[in-house]
Amino acid sequence: MRKLFLIIIFLSITSKCFATIYGVSNGGVFYSINSVNGDTTIINNTIPVMECLAFNTSNVLYGVSRGGVLYTINVSTGVVTQIEDNMPKIDGCAFNSLNTLY
């Protein structure tokens, strides 16, 4: 792991483990960030640029790309899976306790 100066567009913290933060840069690089010491790890450097990231109550990470595509993101591999391709333009997202995405 290394410490980097990063420009992260969106961050999301899983409720399961507050020590890890996940972020996507404006270049489509998916990172994990250790909130204790600031170490960053590149998980995948080829994901779509995201407009938002959010965990649902099952700790599944979702992201909406600039192109309006909803994805799940595997936090271990950075592999994205397309869920929906007709999302409206958004500036942020979050799940409520019933797993409704806003």
Image: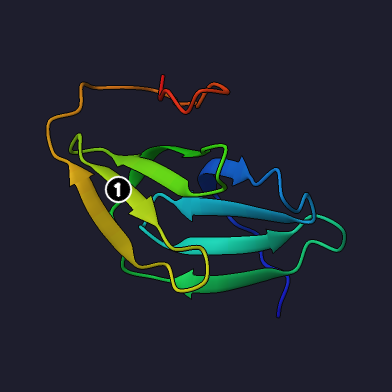
Whole-percent x, y for residue 32 in the image: 61, 63
Q: What residue is drawn where x is 51% and y is 23%?
A: 98
Whole-percent x, y for residue 42 in the image: 53, 72
Q: What residue is drawn where x is 41% and y is 19%?
A: 102
Compared across the picture, whether 55 is left or right of 88 comes to right
Q: Residue furthest left?
A: 86
Vertical placement of residue 79 versus 36, above or below: below
Q: Nearer the viewer, residue 61 or 40?
A: 61
Q: Nearer the viewer, residue 26 or 43?
A: 43
Vertical placement of residue 57 versus 60, above or below: above
Residue on which the image places disc 1? 71
Q: Check disc 1: other Cα within 10 Å, few if <14, some if 14-19, many if 20+.
A: many
Whole-percent x, y for residue 50 in the image: 36, 43
Q: What residue is drawn where x is 13% and y is 39%?
A: 85
Whole-percent x, y for residue 53 in the image: 47, 40
Q: Nearer the viewer, residue 75 or 28?
A: 75
